[in-house]
Image (spheres, helix red, strand yellow):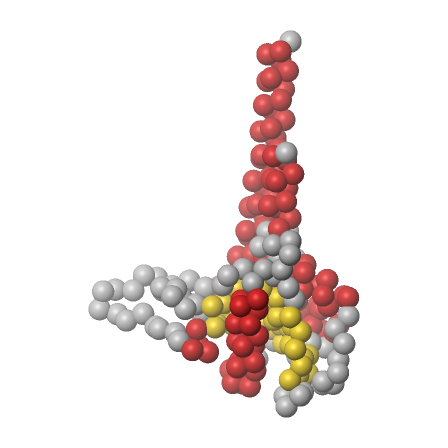
């Protein structure tokens, strides 16, 4: 009986591990669709990323575009700090360079790259206008470090001169999620916006999947 019980326990453990690996795969595919969206669009011209992302476990692009339209967000941006990162490519992937080719270098504000921006149009002007503030907020959040509970805090800042309110939520050491609202400098950011940002951030750092393995290991 003990052997049968042990065998049953192992089978249950393997089944749980299999479900966790499947959930992890789905989370990583969802993240890849967002991070590599430029490559996907180049290979699938005319295909809307919003519709494409709905085929994944976490439809990041669809959720972002829906939120931006419903709440009249000026920009929704995923920012990556590429300083000290060899071979970074804005499109998400590049072939290894030959020995006689120089890899691009990034410094200052250019070391913070918008690897996803909605809407994509006018992103160059967006960086020229808003990047000093965005990078300053990201840097300030890093200096503050993790909040109690081991999570990064959501930052909110209004710049009267630009008539813009910024929300910045750090995903990890290199990645930050930013939402901008233009208009009233006294704009109050309500619960739905905060929940939306938490949904994106937790999806990007696979918080739910990590929580599954922690729960099953107890």
Q: How many marks?
A: 0
Near-viewer residue (147 or 30): 147
Q: Is residue 130 visible?
A: yes
What is the quadrant of the N terminus in the image? top right
Query: Residue drawn 72% across and 85% down?
Result: 185
Front-lying residue, 193 or 96: 193
Q: Where is residue 160 drawn, in percent x and y?
A: 67, 88
Q: Is residue 94 left or right of residue 34?
A: left
Left or right: where 91 falls relative to 59: left
Residue 165 in the image, given as x and y percentages of width and height:
67, 80
Q: Is residue 22 above or below residue 205?
A: above
In-image side of 143 versus 201 (left or right)? left
The quadrant where residue 164 appears: bottom right
Q: Extreme left residue here?
A: 100
In the image, what residue occupies the spot 60% across and 28% down?
13
Can residue 122 be seen here? The reply is no
Left or right side of 26 for 198: right
Residue at x-position 53% and y-position 57%: 32
Which part of the image, by quadrant, shows the C terminus? top right
- The furthest residue to the bottom: 161
Query: Is 78 drawn above or below residue 14 in the view shown?
Result: below
Q: Is residue 213 positioned above or below 114 on the image?
A: above
- In the image shown, does 103 or 207 lie closer to the viewer? 207
- Judge by depth and name the residue closer to the eye, 24 or 157: 157
Q: Residue furthest top?
A: 1
- The residue under the point 60% across, 17% down is 6
Q: Give percent across and percent down for residue 155.
A: 64, 70
- Relative vertical location of residue 153 with respect to residue 9 in this rendering, above or below: below
Residue 105 position, x and y percent, is 35, 73
């Amino acid at each position: 009986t003990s052997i049968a019980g042990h065998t049953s326990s192992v089978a249950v453990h393997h089944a749980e591990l299999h479900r966790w690996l499947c959930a992890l795969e789905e989370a990583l595919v969802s993240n890849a669709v967002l991070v590599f969206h430029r490559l996907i669009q180049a290979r699938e011209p005319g295909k809307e990323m919003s519709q494409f992302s709905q085929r994944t476990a976490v439809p990041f692009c669809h959720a972002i575009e829906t939120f931006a339209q419903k709440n009249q967000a000026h920009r929704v941006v995923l920012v990556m700090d590429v300083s000290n990162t060899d071979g970074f490519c804005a499109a998400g992937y590049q072939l290894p360079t030959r020995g006689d080719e120089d890899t691009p270098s990034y410094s200052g504000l250019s070391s913070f790259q918008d690897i996803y921006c909605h809407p994509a149009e006018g992103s160059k002007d967006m960086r020229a206008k808003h990047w000093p503030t965005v990078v300053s907020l990201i840097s300030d959040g890093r200096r503050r470090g993790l909040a109690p509970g081991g999570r990064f805090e959501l930052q909110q800042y209004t710049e009267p001169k630009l008539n813009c309110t910024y929300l910045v939520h750090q995903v990890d050491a290199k990645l930050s999620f930013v939402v901008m609202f233009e208009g009233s400098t006294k704009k109050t950011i309500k619960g739905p916006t905060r929940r939306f940002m938490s949904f994106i951030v937790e999806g990007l750092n696979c918080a739910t999947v990590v929580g599954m393995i922690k729960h099953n290991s107890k």
